[in-house]
Amino acid sequence: MNIIVLAKLVPDLVEELTIDPGGAALDLTFARWIINEFDDHAIEQGILLKERGGGTVTVLVPDLDGADDVLFTAAAKGADRLIKLGGDFNGVNNHALARAFAAVVKELQADLILTGVQAHDDLDGSAGPLLAECLQMPYVGYVSGVSINDGKSLLRKEYPGGLLAEMEVTTPAVLGIQAAEQPPRYVAVSKVRQAMKTSSIEEQDASSLDPCGGPTVGRMFQPEAAAHATMIAGSPDEVADKLVDLFKELGVL
């Protein structure tokens, strides 16, 4: 089975993010890029499928700072093929990213495409459904388990309220992974360095990125402080009386 995993790089929220002088985008000049958490689970799920049923795992990432580290780490975990998509991906929306990914995935003739179900920088929907639309393939999101049988994928999908569902999807298909069947495996730095010596990164160009369909941001700003919380002191009866008076003042009672 030919499994393709698409991974996004997102700004590290540990670092302080700033808004550029234009006021409509983040200043990503000094941003630290890390793999999207859900995409890390997608890589793990792809490798688990390979270990159970054979096949190959190809990991595809956009060319941003840290892309090589993500790819070599994936190789150390068990990925077979590493592809870096070249182009200016700073501030690119998911519509453009999905189209760029789709052009490469079509050539790879994948049986199964995995990606994270969402990312913390998504403003226009997750990349998975957009990619599925470009490829004219079925899409299932919020997947937390995958098994393959006779060319069909048996999926475990999570719903709000702790509900689980199982569904069968004919491959090829695009899956949005919420959680792999086990946490992403840890690999030692020494193993990653070994992968750097034994694995190679292929580069493919995506210089033409079409942002059509994405939202137009008019303004970005830090949350502005308004009213502050008021602490009500006193005994339980006194606090209750003050709350009743407040609710009457607000017209609730």
Image: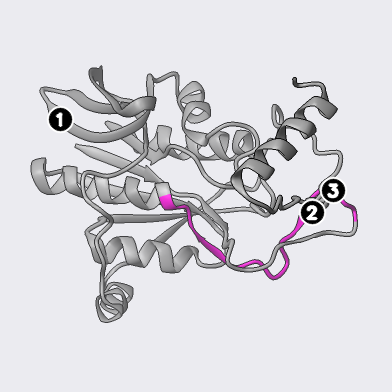
Is tag 1's residue or tag 3's residue first in the polypeptide sequence?
Answer: 1
Q: Determine contact: label 1, label 3, CB under 8 Å.
A: no
- The verdict on residue 145 being magenta is no
The residue labelled by disc 2 is 222
> Which label belongs to residue 137?
none
Q: How far apart are marks 1 and 2 (CA)?
A: 46 Å
The residue labelled by disc 3 is 226
Label 3 sits on what residue type?
A: Ala
What's the magenta region?
Answer: 22-37
Q: Quadrant of residue 200?
A: bottom left
Q: Front-most of 237 and 175?
A: 237
The residue depicted at 33 percent of the width and 25 percent of the height is: 173
Q: Characterize the magenta stretch by its predominant secondary structure.
A: loop
Could you tell me if residue 115 is visible in this image? yes
Pair 2/3: label in front: 3
Pair 1/3: label in front: 3
